[in-house]
Image (tube, coloured by chain):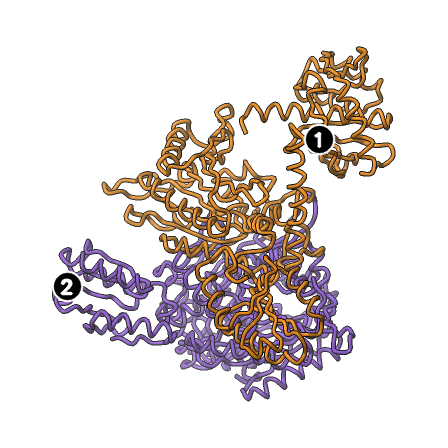
Chain colours: A purple, B orange
Amino acid sequence: MPETHLEELAIMRHSLAHVLAQAVLKLWPDTKITIGPAIDHGCYYDFKFATPISDTDFPTIEKEMKKIIHQGQTFRRDELSPKDAISYWKGKDQKFKVELIEDLVKNENVEMVTNYVNVGPKGEDTFADLCRGGHVESTKQIPVDGFKLMTLAGAYWRGDEKRDQLTRIYVAAFASKEELDAYLTQMEEAKKRDHRKIGKEMDLFTFSELVGPGLPLWTPRGTLMRHLLDGFVWELREERGYQRVTIPHITKKELYEKSGHWAKFKDDLFRITTRDDHEFAMKPMNCPHHTQIYNHLPRSYKNLPQRYAETTMVYRDEQTGELHGLSRVRSITQDDAHVFCRQSQVEEEFLRVWDIIDIFYKTTGFGALKVRLSLHDPEHFEKYLGTQELWKNAEDAIRGIATDRGISYVEALGEAAFYGPKVDFIAVDSIGREWQVATIQLDINMPERFDLFCTNEQGEKERIVMIHCAVMGSLERFLSTFIEHHAGHFPLWVTPIQAAVLPVADTHEAHAAQIASDLMEKGMRIEYMNSSESLGKRIREGETQRIPYLLVIGDKEIAEGTVTVRNIRTKKQVAVPIAEFIASVTNDVAARKLVLSIG
Amino acid sequence: MPETHLEELAIMRHSLAHVLAQAVLKLWPDTKITIGPAIDHGCYYDFKFATPISDTDFPTIEKEMKKIIHQGQTFRRDELSPKDAISYWKGKDQKFKVELIEDLVKNENVEMVTNYVNVGPKGEDTFADLCRGGHVESTKQIPVDGFKLMTLAGAYWRGDEKRDQLTRIYVAAFASKEELDAYLTQMEEAKKRDHRKIGKEMDLFTFSELVGPGLPLWTPRGTLMRHLLDGFVWELREERGYQRVTIPHITKKELYEKSGHWAKFKDDLFRITTRDDHEFAMKPMNCPHHTQIYNHLPRSYKNLPQRYAETTMVYRDEQTGELHGLSRVRSITQDDAHVFCRQSQVEEEFLRVWDIIDIFYKTTGFGALKVRLSLHDPEHFEKYLGTQELWKNAEDAIRGIATDRGISYVEALGEAAFYGPKVDFIAVDSIGREWQVATIQLDINMPERFDLFCTNEQGEKERIVMIHCAVMGSLERFLSTFIEHHAGHFPLWVTPIQAAVLPVADTHEAHAAQIASDLMEKGMRIEYMNSSESLGKRIREGETQRIPYLLVIGDKEIAEGTVTVRNIRTKKQVAVPIAEFIASVTNDVAARKLVLSIG
């Protein structure tokens, strides 16, 4: 989407938040208003209601909003001194607005604030909001059939659980009814694919009240998938000269003081005070530890590149309210790698990683990924480590590599890591949503901070560079995307249970159990479902668990030495000789095929 | 060793500590004395010297000690009121003794303390120490040629780094000169095999000042060994129906309050306060987390046993002074497993684990392990969870299993875990030292605390039991033992670099490099050592790195299509056709052979 269109959309969405607040105040005049920003897909507004509302009130609110839109109200900008503004909002009995102005004075020392006032058809003031501005000219510019109230959610004033509890109304808002409908359909589809629901039905992971939120516990089936996916990444890396290393999950804070992470991310770290009264932190990333392995021996140019890979958990102290299934967790498993190489080796190493990413995402069914070059924000260079020159060289190098690769890409200013520019890869899932997945980062700053070098051909110290490259990135986040993209119907090689064996009746049990055990012997992952439940119920159970093949075994199959294979995706049934079934599965797994060959 | 002999030895060693202190006071009368207990292999005494001594003073001290022993001094018991004792030790200007008595009064409310006074040949008092007693009758009973002053070490008064710094003198002491000599030889050999030294020479692991003590960083070679060993354990487990699970390294403290670990191990936990002000802990063990995976679904007797395995790091807040190489670390990798089963399945599951342990330790070169049944301490039942009856049944069950297994074992009272009895396995290394390695624990208490049950054939709730079983236990500790046992000369399958290729001169480089690359192609782990250094130097380097086979390639080898294989253990050299070398290594690795087949 072009930038300008995105900006217009944000202005429309934010204006709609004013409309929402106006409607709410009309319906419940003693409501306290707070703030209403535009967000992806729409906007929200946080209110403190005198008596709770529910989503059964949505039609009434929407009706009121449409009335306001049809009136073509305009937005008038009123500039006030803080003193006058406070008195204005005190008069309206809106304590949150008063607090906002007081803080603006205290923290930013402002001398003027602005109210935006809606003006109705007869020139009357209909609603005012304390706001920095950016609105449509008339509410008529808001597509009247392009929005929908979506959900109510709890929120705290200023995100602080010790302050007032507020009610947040989420609104979906688009430029047209068609876009809204497409979004609602996507949401509907997304709900069916929700990885939390499918993860439960397939028994992949669970959470425990006693262990705590954001800390998934992986069941045998989920762990198996993690090992299969991570094993594939390792296979691709091993072929390309990577070696595994192992580090602990904690460190003295000195490591992060040196790396610069302490100053930058202090609040996101889980911090520990030891019995000896030393300060430690749980690692939120692996790079500083890996530099210590590089640096424990003198390195010659002959030893480079050193390519370290490690799949390991990192920890971030996310706020409880921000946690969501697997997509936002506190224990994040990274399939991380760091290449320590000479400047002259950067391109080759970048392309090597790029190959791994391409192969991995094609094989897991995502097809080609979108590519974004994430560069520094030239207006806020103070957010980054290093000199302008270092950054220019690094960004030019990355742009050159992307061009050589012959792919199309976008550049995004301000999206770089604080230690260097990066290439981000974005997957588009089967219902059109975009997810940032893999990343390759060029790091010009850690090598300076940790004094990483090699001895070159002339016997001189030569500063090296680091490349950070995660393929799945976070296994948890990847799996949430992978589950929703496939709606639980994974390629056979990564499916935890590949087939279930279902005897029709108890007379077929002995034969069916033997087949189940033969298949397991061949290395297949099989579930045996005995005949204590009806066949129909077992088939539904197999479907819920997304077991791709259900093998039904009755008199006919026993007589003919076949199995009736039910493909749960196509719902087709075919009778095939057992050897043929084994050959098909074995081939599909070995070839990491995306689709099922039978049925 | 029979218990009574061990007790006699301890009495002799402690008496020797008095002799040491007497000798020190004779030589340096203004020394302050503290305490001198018997320990394994001897005793120590902590002194505060007015001016530092060094180990060059050891012969003088030993000479003085021998004089005392030859005199046949006796030990007289003097009972004193605390008041008189304090005045006695103040008179001797011994402040530590005064503090000890004051504390005895304060903490234990004692009404009488004892001095033990050495009496010389003329009936004169030669030395006094505040002591609870337990001495030989005459110093002549101390074997005069059975002891040796070993080392000086720093220590803090009462182990507190804020108190006085003391000098500890370690003494080796045995019942005879022969036993002492055997021990000294063992120590000499142990020094050569020190895993810290060999680990560095082979580049297996390293430590970083910035990351902190007790937190090893595993290099590519060390990590490879970890994966090979752990992969073997997993292979043995997978064949026996185990499944892998995955848990995070932290938890809310509520989990440990429920399990009982919080009350028991609070001080050993790394504790975290989150930004939301919740209290978390790093896991010091995995069992409580695993119960949450068992318990997230209702379980029928048909689903049992559930066998969960996971190799994962646990964290313990060890004091810095207690850390030692890999044998005592803060980040401990456990190859942990928990079996959730019915009471009736305990024996079969125990034997299944026992098989794994037997196979693993034979294959890693330790031979048969000693077995110890670790039972509760009947005099301190308050240290354990659960009822007397639960414990009796559990201990009887374990005794029955050990008897059925037909092995010899010892029973050790007071060595049980706080939640149940266990079987401990002890390896004897190649220089005769004993190391506790694997363990199988029967847990009757966690299932109660977490209400773990299955539904039985009658549809009733049935309480289950847990079996805890680690094979290597701590990978770090296992590797320290494994390295020292083999002195770095590992079986080929677990050796990080299996062969080095050494061209004699630069004219042989192309051919040699081709051979190196062919061998790698066959899956061997090869180091290529080019001819920039002399052949002799490269051979010594290969020996230092414990690369088992050094393949020398010169004119003759090129002409004949052979390699000259130098076996670094036997120092023998044989020329073999390349294909033969490949076949030998491939076979030895596949068979996990303990010895090298060539040379």
The residue closer to the viewer here, B301 or B592, is: B592
Q: Residues within 10 Å of mark 1 (few under 14, many from 20)?
A: many
Q: Give the structural element (helix, strand or loop) at label 2.
A: loop
Q: Is residue B500 above or below residue A424?
A: above
Picture residue at 34% right of the left edge, 47% below the top: B305
Residue type at the position of mark 2 = Gly
Q: Is residue A109 left or right of residue B595?
A: right
Can you give x and y, in whole percent of width and height, for residue B4 in the image? 56, 23
Q: Give the structural element (helix, strand or loop) at label 1.
A: strand
Q: Is residue B442 above or below residue A333?
A: above
Q: Is residue B308 above or below residue B132?
A: below
**The C terminus of chain A - image quarter:** bottom left
Residue type at the position of mark 1 = Phe
Can you give x and y, in whole percent of width and height, for residue A161 in the image? 56, 53
Picture residue at 47% right of the left edge, 66% below the top: B586
Q: Which mark is residue A450?
A: none
The residue closer to the viewer here, A155 or B311, is: B311
The residue closer to the viewer here, B97 or A385, is: B97
The reply to whether residue A44 is visible in this rendering is yes
Q: Chain of mark 1?
A: B
Picture residue at 67% right of the left edge, 19% below the top: B135
Q: Which mark is residue A554?
A: 2
Q: Is residue B521 above or below residue B184?
A: below
Q: Residues within 10 Å of mark 2 (few under 14, many from 20)?
A: many
- The residue that mark 1 highlights is B147
Label 1 – label 2 distance at C-alpha: 81 Å
Can you give x and y, in whole percent of width and height, for residue A304 in the image? 66, 73
Q: Chain of mark 2?
A: A
The residue closer to the viewer here, A109 or A282, is: A282
**Which image quarter: residue A341?**
bottom right
